[in-house]
Structure formats: C-alpha cells, structure tokens
Amino acid sequence: MLENLAGSFMLMLTPINLLYMLLGVSGGMMAGALPGLTATMSVALLVPFTFRMDPVTGLVTLGAIYCGAIFGGAFAAILVNTPGTPSSIGTTFDGFPLTKQGKGEEAVWAAALASASGGLIGTVILLFLAPPLASVALRFGAPEYFWVSIFGLTIVSSIAGGSLIKGFAGALLGLLISTIGLAPIGGEVRFIFGMSALQGGVSIIPALIGFFCIPEILNMVGTGLSVSQLEQHGDSIKITSFQKFKNTFKEVIRMPGNIIRSSLIGAFVGIIPGAGGNIANLVAYNEAKRISKYPQKFGTGIIDGVVATEAANNATVEGGLVPLLTLGIPGTPPAAVIFGALMLQGLRPGPELFADHAPLAYAFILSFFVANIMMFVVGIVGGKTFYEVITKLPMRILVPAIAFLTMLGSFAIRGNIMDVYTMMILGFAGYGLKELGFHPGPIVLGLILGPIAEEGLVQGYLMGPPGARWTIFFTRPISIALIILSILSLFWPIFQSKVLDADKK
Amino acid sequence: MKNEKTTINSDIISAIIIVLVAAIFGWQLYKAQMAQFGFIFPAFIIFSMVVCGIALFIKSVLKPEMLASFQKEYNLRLYLVAVFLFAWTFTLVNLGFGLASLIFFALIVLIAERKYTPKDILIAIVVSGLMVGVFYWIFTSMLLLRLPRGILF
C-alpha cells in the first residue's frame, strides 16, 4: 500500500490536476452557497466536462467540487440564515446569531477551518479504515435504519429553541409533510388533496429553502434591518481582519475534541448508505451541545456550534466514499454521481478497483488531502469576499435578490413549477410558525428523517418473524445500541439542565 | 406608546393549528382507506400530533408562552412584500420566469426603498434587469435549465 501511496501522490500532484482542483473547489463553493444548488447537482452538472479528461484529473476535479459545495453551504447559512445545502442546516443555529453579533467573518473562517479539518480526518478514515467500516455499514438493515431515524429525532430536544413541545410538534409536522405523495412501500398515493403534481411528494430542498429563507426575508423587511444593519447591533470591538482571523484560529484549534468527535460522526454517518451530511451535521451539533460545559450558550451564537456542524458535514464527503470505493455502494447522493463518473471512465467501484487500478484509486483518495487544504485557503479569502458583499448590500437589493434565487433554486431541483409553489407556501407557513415560537430546525429534521423512518418501520415489520413481527426492532445488537443511544440523547438535556440548576444553587 | 406591543398566548394558537392540521390529514387518511403499509406511519404521526396539541393546550392554560407575534416595525411593508412574493410565484408560468422576475424584483426594490422619484424607479429597473438577466443567462445558457416561458421570454 505504501508504495502505491507514494506513486499515487505523484500521479495526483501535477500542475494541471492542481489547477482543476482549485477551479473545482472554488466553483463548488459558489454553487453550494446558492440555496437550491446542492452538492449533488454541482457534481452532476460537471460530470460531462470530465469525460474527456484523463481519469485522474476528472476524478480529482469531481472530488474537489464535492468538498467545495458542501463547505459553500455554510456561507449562506451564516450570513443570511439560509442553509446553502441541507448539510449546513445546523450551521444556521449559531452561525447567523454570530453574524447578528457582528462576528459573521469569524464564523465563516471558523467554518472554513472546521470543514478542512473534518475533510482531512475523513480522508484519513477513508484511506486506512475503509474496509472494516464498510462491513459495519452492511449490517444496517431496515430495523437499524428505523432506529437511526428515531435517534435523529431525539435531536429535537437540543434544537427545539424555546419550547420542547413545540419542537416535537414541529418535527411531527415535518414527518407528516414527508408522507405526502407515494407511500415508499405499497406505492399508495397519500395526502395529495386532489393535486396530481403532489404525487412525487414534497422535495426537501424547496421545503428547506421555504422554511429558512422566506421567514428571514419577511423578517428583514418587517424590521427594516439588513445584515449590514444587524451588524451595528453587535458589540464587536473594532479590530483588524488579521487579528480577528488569528483569534478565530486560536479559538477553533482550542477545541480538538469537538472537531475530532464531529468529524468521526460525519464520517460514520456518511458511510451508512442513505444518510448524509443533512443528518450528520445535526447529530454532531446535538453531541457538541450535550458534551459542552456551557450547553445553554448553543443557539445564541457560539463558534462551537459552527465548528461541530461544519467538521461533520465535510467528513461525510469522504465517509460517503467508503462504501462506494470498497463495495461499489454509494453512501451519499453525490457519491452516487461519482459512481457514474467512475463507470464512464471504465472503472468499476468495488474491491477490484483497488486490485486493478490501485494507483488511480489512491490518487483519488489522496486528492482529498489537497482539496481540503485548498478549500481552507479559498474559504478564508472567498469567505471574506462573500461577507463583504452580503453585509454591504442594502436591504432593498438583498431581499429581492434572495427571493429571486430561492425561486430559481427551487425550480432548478426538478424543473417543476410545483416545487416553487411548495417552497413559497411552506415559507409563509414557516414565517407564521416562527412567529408562534416554532424553530424551523425540527420541522426540516422531520422532513429529512420521515422517509428513512417509514421505510425502516414498514420494511422491518415485513422482515420480522410471522406472529411476532415487531420483535425484530428490539432483538438485533445494533438496534439495541441505537435504542440506548436514543434514550440517552432524549433525556440528556433534562439531566443536564438539572445538573446546571444544581450547580447554580 | 408607539412601540408598545401586545402579546398573545402563542401556545393556544399553536395547539389549534397542530390539531387542525392533524384533523385535515387524518380525514384524508380515513377517506383514502389504505392498506396497512401506507397507513401505519402517517396514522401514528397524526395520533402523536393530537397528543402534542393537547399538551400545548394544557400548557396554554397552566404556563402560557406569551409572544408579541406578527408585530414588526414595518408591518405594512412586510405584507406588501408578502403579496408581491406570492404574486411573483403564481405568475411565473403565465408571464414567464424572466418577465415576472423583472417586474416583481423591481417592485420589491421600490417598496423597500420607499422612494418613488423617476430616478429611483430607473435604478430599480436597472438593478432588477441586471440581476435577473445575469442569473437567467447562467441558468438557461450555461446550466441548460428550461425556465418557464410566458408572453415574452
């Protein structure tokens, strides 16, 4: 393996590959920053351009785009409270409050450093631990997927905002919206209210844009404050950008536990086929809050929250490639697109990839080290530029510009006008619910986890022994571990608040 | 007294909304008469929503969360923008993505600006033309996305 690594490193490190990686990271970042243009779309759109490239160049370019797009989502999440991709939902929780405090620049830099760290840790895992982890992922059956989604739903207790009951009600609402359209098992049509366009269900991206973006637009108009004016409400001391960068860098590297834990969560969630950055970032946020010495500060604008979500979502990039490269099973949707790109280059993902094309496979894996370092550098420079542009734009331009991009983004997903209608209707509903104290996070979490939970529940039920079908959910080792984790996660915030109260007394 | 805001019992309104949504979806589920596989999961969610609604109702009596909801500094402007956004969305097909976006982008710029001199109107048109034009070109010519075409483009 070691001789392969040295040769592959040299194969990957050519000027042309480096140039394409730089372009890929930058392009991916820009696409990721636009709500509606997901990492999957960015990678898919650029696959045709890699057909004529040398296989190594094509693959390293796609990998760089993927890394950049996942990180790019943080820009919109931090600066306009709208996740650019579903992988940065959790970044809004502390990122935007930081912007309101006048610390948006620091938040973007922290996201860049955390994303690069997450990506580098994910690459180490992909390089050295891929085969054993892929075999663990294969043990996940329907009952385990059901419990994974239940574990995911316990996060509501951390992200509910003010009221826990409203948090759970919001998650249930999200779950209910996710059931609109065809049932995953049986194929019956549900809740379409006579509109055949709803048969395909509510797509996550338009719902995500609606729930996060439209309420923010209306809020900006209602308060008359743009991001630049919100900033003046902050109490940041005027210091130079370099000093800010130095302080942020120090603050982030002082939390290695948070970075490593979140990256491991991200890599592991990415390995499980069907789960991705959209779940990983929320799980990592929940764990960071649970383990923190100051959990009550999460959601008010602290760097720890941004670091947790960004380290996790970039680690899913490499995590998602573990089952793809070792077993030929894509772990995430963009990994599925890369699967297609590999096939087009005449390479079959799976064990034979390492046997027959080892230098190429290792060159692809090693390129993530370079791409993540590039992403950090471009992220620092690009982040500052994005920050300057967003904060300098007056509200009268920012509001219609965001509205225009939300419509364009919602339409671009499937080329379906119904997605734009859905986005707008859910956006207004989201505004109303936000005014009533509902946080959009649990609603979107329900929407993401709904299909996984339903499929897991019904398929698991069908897998169970006749006469005692439900027992399958409680007898498999991974299921039992997930049940214990879910119980711990659900009751931890209550236990933690009791401990904090006792400490105060 | 200008800035004084009245608070509302947000829990009771939330409880009503949650129960109402559960009732609408529950009625649809009952009417559809589905097989077990398509029924079991939504039925469980609807039941849980009713439970949450009842819990919110009890909370609204015992310990209500009073919020100054729907009272912003510029409520009229907010409602106007909301109407424009709604109209923008629902005219995309008939007017076309480009034209609808040009019109409503400019209208929102004007509403947010609150200045209506010929110069301001011209600026609004130029800004919206540039923004819509650039992104329209990127999405249709570079990303080859077929945006809805209406009466003009």
Image: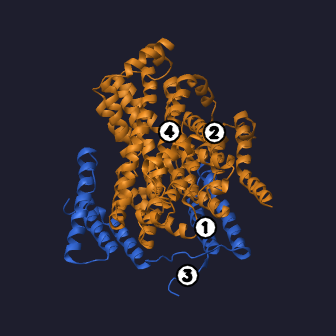
Chain colours: A orange, B blue
A286 sits left or right of B131 in the view:
right
Mark found first going from the N terminus, 3 or 1: 3
Label 4: how many Cα within 10 Å (few below 14, some 14–19, many 20+):
many
Give the mark toward the camera: 4 or 2.
Answer: 2
User: Label 3 belongs to which residue?
Assistant: B5
Subunit ID for the residue under disc 1: B
SS for callout 2: helix
Q: Separation of disc 4 and disc 2 at Cα?
A: 16 Å
Label 1: how many Cα within 10 Å (few below 14, some 14–19, many 20+):
many
Q: Separation of disc 3 and disc 2 at Cα?
A: 44 Å
User: Label 4 belongs to which residue?
Assistant: A314
Locate residue B102, reporting x and y percent: 25, 64
User: Label 2 belongs to which residue?
Assistant: A257
Locate residue A66, reporting x and y percent: 42, 37
Disc 3 marks which amino acid? Lys
Mark found first going from the N terminus, 4 or 2: 2
